[in-house]
Image: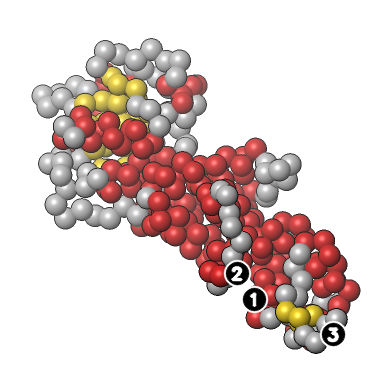
Amino acid sequence: MPVAAVARRLGVAPATLRTWDRRYGLGPSRHTGGKHRRYGATDISRLELMQRALLRGASTAEAARFALDAAITDGPAETRPARADPDRSVARRLRGAAFALDAAATQRLLAAAIADAGAGAAWETVIEPVLTAFGAGWHGTHAGAEAEYLLTESVLAALIRATPLLEQPRNSRPVLLSTVPDERSALPLYALAACLAERGISAQVFGTAPPAEVLAVAVRRSAPAAVVLRAQRSTMADGGLFPRVSRGRQRSRVFAWGPGWGGAALPDKVELLPDLREAAERIEYVLLGR
C-alpha cells in the first residue's frame, strides 16, 4: 500500500508516517519499480501496534520501541534481526506491553518466557528486572502506576498458571511459603512455588502475610516438611518469628529467604537461602536428598 492509503487506514497524516519512518525506522520495506516504496502487511501491523500503544498513553518513542520489539519475535523467522541478548529483548517487549496497558500481550510474553526457560530463569532474567525497572525508571522514563499494577497482576497470574496442582508430589508433606508479617512483596514466593512444582515438590503459599500467631497455628496444624519465610525489607525481618513457627512435635526445616534477612541474627538451625533457583535446589536436596 502507498503512504497515502496507509495514512487513511490509520487516520493519521502522511507526514506523520514519514516522520515515524525517519525517526524510528517504522517505514515501508517493499520497493516497486522506480523510487516508490510500499507498505507491506508486516509494516502495517507494526504501525497498528504503535498506534495502539499511543492511544493507551505511551510516548511516541515508547510506542515505537514496543512495535519494533514485538516485530522482532512475531515476524517471520527469515526477517527477524539477530539478537545478541534475547532476554533483554524479551524484557523490553514485556515492559513495553505493560506500559501500553496491553494485558493480552503482557500475558502472552510472560507465558512464553516461562515456557521457554522455566519459571526460575524467566524470573531472574526477564520478570524481576522488568519489575525492578518499573520501580527505578527505565532509561530515565518513569512509567505510570497503572502499568506497574497491570504488570504485577499479570506476573502473579502467570506464575500461578505455571504452578500445577501435583497429583503425586515427591514430598509427602508440603513446603509452606510465607512472607513475614507486614511484608507486601509476595511475588517471589509464587516464583519459588513454580520452581518447586517443576521439580515435583508441592508448596502452599501465603501471599498475604498472616499475623505471627496465625502463621504459627498454620504450621502446627499442617505440619509442613519445611517453612520458608520471605523478608524483602530489613525493617520487616524479625528473627524472633522463627521459634514461634518451629514449635510442636513434628519439627519442620525452617528457612529464611530474601534480602531483608541479610543483616539479621538468625537462630540456630535456620538456614538462609540464596537466589531463587539455588533456593529451589537447596530445598529439594534437604527434603529429598537430591
Specify how the rendered protein is coloured: secondary structure
Can you tell which mark lies on residue 79? 2
Q: Amino acid at mark 2?
A: Thr
Distance Cα–Cα, label 1 vs label 3: 22 Å
Compared to 56, does 271 lie above or below? Answer: above
The image shows residue 173 at horizontal and vertical percentages of: 15, 39
- For the C terminus, the image quarter is top left
Q: Residue at x 50, y 21 (%)?
A: 235
The image shows residue 128 at horizontal and vertical percentages of: 51, 42
When asked about the image quadrant of residue 229, the answer is top left
Q: Choose the circle earlier in sequence order: 1 or 2.
A: 1
Viewer-side residue, 71 vs 107: 71
Image mark count: 3
The image shows residue 95 at horizontal and vertical percentages of: 60, 52
Q: Amino acid at mark 3?
A: Gly
Q: Choose the circle earlier in sequence order: 2 or 3.
A: 3
Distance Cα–Cα, label 1 vs label 2: 10 Å
When asked about the image quadrant of residue 227, the answer is top left
Dot 3 falls on a residue whose secondary structure is loop
User: Position of 222 compared to 20: left or right?
Assistant: left
Distance Cα–Cα, label 2 vs label 3: 24 Å
* Mark 1 vs 2: CB contact within 8 A: yes
The image shows residue 66 at horizontal and vertical percentages of: 66, 60
- For the N terminus, the image quarter is bottom right
Q: Residue at x 55, y 64 (%)?
A: 73
Residue that lies at the very extreme toward the right in this rendered image: 15
Viewer-side residue, 45 vs 37: 37
Identify residue for label 1.
42
Q: Amino acid at mark 1?
A: Thr
